[in-house]
Image (cartoon, helix red, strand yellow):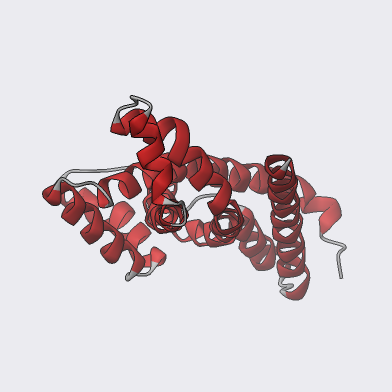
């Protein structure tokens, strides 16, 4: 069943590295963008809050496949063109940011309002209180949900092969077409995704335990 691996194992290795690279970049960008959108959404500046809310609703209520297709195939019609790799990172980042913002907002809402009042009474500004007191606690509260979002991001990255990114699914499809085998190539792909997400989930659990101490 897995005889093809002796010939195509390098393709899987290269594809795995591409998947990890795309997922990691999208994870980092999505995290920072999500925190910014969260802060904009809870801001007292109404236009900023409305824009952030509109962004979240649009992204959360449209499929990520449609989003990446718009970025890669539709934007060039108005003069904006990205490579397949950049299109994948942009699509995954903006999609993840919408979910991260809601997770983080829930984490902030779970913090007692007295924390903000205590910070202000100590002479800290609103931004200093958020940065030094509220956001660190919100991150700890949100970590389990953020971990689930990051794991989902890795699995959702499998759609990037639609725009030509040579990820794990791209390799599995190429090997399937070359060998006329279906079960083996896709089973290997599933196993690789499992290993990546399992390692990530264990890392998140380890971070949770560390923060608890």
Position of residue 8 in the picture relative to residue 145 (left or right) = right
Residue 132 at x, y = what percent? 45, 30
Q: Residue at x 76, y 55 (%)?
A: 195
Residue that appears at 17% across and 47% down:
48
| 89 vs 180, nearest the viewer | 89
The image quadrant of residue 86 is top left
Residue 66, image x, y percentages: 34, 66
Give residue 72's position: percent from left, percent from top. Answer: 33, 53
Nearest the eye: 49 or 100 = 49
Q: Residue at x 38, y 69 (%)?
A: 63
As drawn, the residue found furthest toward the top would be 123
| Residue 134 visible in the picture | yes
Residue pushed farthest bottom? 183
Look at 27% across and 52% down and name the residue there.
41
- Depth check: give the residue in front, 102 or 61: 102
**Visible in this render: residue 83?**
no
Residue at the left extreme of this rendering: 47
The percent position of residue 201, horizontal first and vertical second, equals: 70, 54
* Above or below, comparing residue 203 to residue 198 in the picture: above
- Work out which quarter of the rendered image holds the C terminus and state it: top right
**Image quarter in which the N terminus is found:** bottom right
19 horizontally vs 195: left or right: left
């Amino acid at each position: 069943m897995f005889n093809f691996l002796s010939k195509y194992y390098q393709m899987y290795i290269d594809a795995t590295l591409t998947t990890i690279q795309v997922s990691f970049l999208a994870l980092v960008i999505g995290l920072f963008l999500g925190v910014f959108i969260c802060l904009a959404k809870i801001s007292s500046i109404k236009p900023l809050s409305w824009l952030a809310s509109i962004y979240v609703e649009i992204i959360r209520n449209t499929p990520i496949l449609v989003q990446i297709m718009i970025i890669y195939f539709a934007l060039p019609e108005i003069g904006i063109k990205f490579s397949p790799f950049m299109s994948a990172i942009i699509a995954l980042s903006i999609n993840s940011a919408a979910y991260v913002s809601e997770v983080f907002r829930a984490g902030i809402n779970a913090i007692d309002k007295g924390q903000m009042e205590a910070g202000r009474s100590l002479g800290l500004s609103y931004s200093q209180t958020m940065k030094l007191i509220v956001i660190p606690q919100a991150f700890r509260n949100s970590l389990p949900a953020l971990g689930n979002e990051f794991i989902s991001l890795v699995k959702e990255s499998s759609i990037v092969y639609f725009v030509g990114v040579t990820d794990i699914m791209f390799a599995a499809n190429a090997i399937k077409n070359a060998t006329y085998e279906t079960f083996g190539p896709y089973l290997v792909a599933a196993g690789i995704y499992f290993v990546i997400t399992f390692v990530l989930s264990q890392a998140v659990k380890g971070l949770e335990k560390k923060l608890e101490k």
